[in-house]
Image: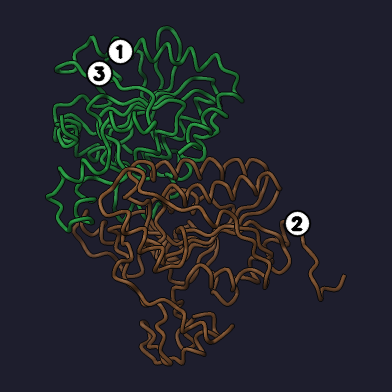
Amino acid sequence: MSAFDSVTAARANDRPTAVDYITKIFGDSFIEFHGDRRFADDKAVIGGIAELCGKPVTVIGLEKGRNLKERMERNFGSAHPEGYRKSLRLMKQAEKFHRPIICFVDTSGAYCGIGAEERGQGQAIAENLSEMMTLKTPILSILIGEGGSGGALALAVADEVWMLENAIYSVISPEGCASILWKDAGKTAEASECLKLTSQDLFKLGVIERIIREPKNLDSTMFESLKNLVAQTFDRLGAMDTEALLQKRYNRFRKY
Amino acid sequence: MNTSDIFNFLKPKNELENQGEAIDNRPYIPDELWVKCPVCKNPVLSADLNENKKVCPKCGYHFRIGARQRIELTADEGSFEEFDAELTSTNIIDFPDYTRKLKNAKLNSGENESVITGIALIEGYKVVLAVMNSQFMMGSMGTVTGEKITRAFEYATENRLPVVIFTVSGGARMQEGILSLMQMAKTSGAVKRHNDAGLLYITVLTDPTTGGVTASFAMEGDIILSEPKALIAFAGPRVIEQTIRQKLPKDFQSAEFLLEKGFIDAVVPRVEMKKTLSHILQLHGAEKVLQEGDSE
């Protein structure tokens, strides 16, 4: 599979979104919470609490929507500042109640618009990055589709970052890269190769800890094994001394 | 200020990297006797412009200046001691044409990276100073940029010093792929530790500050200042116009706009910047180093 095949797969309309992961992993135990307590509730971010193998967890996802109506409502998974502020509020809540945090990342990027700039998109992302670095609870981020630049990183300053086999994670979209490099947004395939955005590339670069194999049609066995893997990981991270956990998280990003 | 400086000042080069954001090519000072101000269109004598810290004496337009000159305007004479001057980027993910671009950036700027870091005194107050350089690939943040900023913060945390950063950047450096994105997290981690140690961090945003730098350490200061009219954005104006397909309001994303929206503390003209920094440092109990000629 070429890098561009991954880009296509990561963006496919029938690919499971954060809501699918939440439903299949947490079932009925998920309770959704809304709002950033400052401005609005951003539907590009879905968050709440749930039960994982008998233990409470905080769940946050960038949600693209599964049909056109949902996609419009969810702004195609591109969050405004209030989405990042909602996620930070829920993460702080998780820290207070000693719950681990799982983030599902799937976005082409933070939204670029007038309101987003007016309300401090850069500041909102920056605050997530610095706060997540010292949040005293385990954080696991899973890139399930697109990992678009700062808008994805704002939910991926974690103790471990995993990627679905065909997910992508990049500093710029292949289209954006191609239009800068060759003044031709059509050369997406070439740009996809150059950016080293596939799960294999990122594993080699040490940017992710684990690749989740994708069976055909992403069937339920994958979600079941993912669920067990997440639970084991939280047990392992949760057993660590908090200072050691935070030092390890700092070092994880310090090495790049 | 030495007026011969203007003859060494670099002309804009076409190779200067533009990260695809709408960063217009506002003129650097050319080596002519007279300069036309791009805003008020008045001719200004280059020597007068230099005397006035490269601010148009007629309309107050702040010309872009290089990092070395910024240090000269900010640090007490002879006080700047540079860190990691030799650190420089390599083509880590084997990105097309990056090796050539880096070479050009070094030639054009005379620097090894898009940020200069070190220790400085500002009216006697000891600080860790980092100054980004728009002449090096439009101040884009690569791994070495992030490393130098992170080391500067770690040094400041260890030695309990305040940090002052002048930002100017087109954002993360595309040519280093995901590793440039990781610099946002890395620098933010170092800023957070400095913050948690109770130490002061002042950012000064200069034209333009965008993308991954805005979305990380630029917006993490305890106190965020800006030069007048600087463009400060997460997404640049061209990207937004392409997304929403409408014209942006005038002065959108200017320093004054951000001030009104509540995202920066103050807009400070270049001629008052050093005095303002020193005043803030003094009010935070910064360590004052007595220099020759100072009286107790």
Q: Disc 3 to disc 2, how far (Cα)?
A: 55 Å
Q: Mark 2 points at which residue?
A: B285
Mark 3–mark 1 distance (CA, rounded to whole Å)? 22 Å
Q: The green chain is which one?
A: A
Q: Which chain carries label 2?
A: B
Looking at the rendered structure, which numbered label has been put on residue A213?
3
Pinpoint residue B246: horizontal percent, then vertical percent: 20, 61
Among the chains pictured, the one given brown colouring is B
Check disc 1 and give the amino acid type.
Gly
> Which corner quadrant of the image does residue A63 belong to?
top left
Q: How far is the residue under mark 1 from the one under mark 2? A: 55 Å
Report the residue that reaches farthest toward the left: A186
Q: What element carries label 3?
A: loop
Disc 3 crowd, CA 10 A, few/some/many (<14, 14-19, 20+):
few
Q: Tell me which residue sits at (50%, 67%) in the image.
A: B67
- Dot 2, crowdedness within 10 Å: few (<14), some or many (≥20)? few
Residue B218 % position (x, y): 49, 54
On the image, numbered disc 1 is attached to which residue?
A27
Q: Which residue is drawn at 43% across and 53% down?
A: B214
Horizontal side, residue A207 vs residue A134: left or right: left
The foreground one among A97 and B38 is B38
How far across and how far down the image is residue B272, in percent? 60, 75
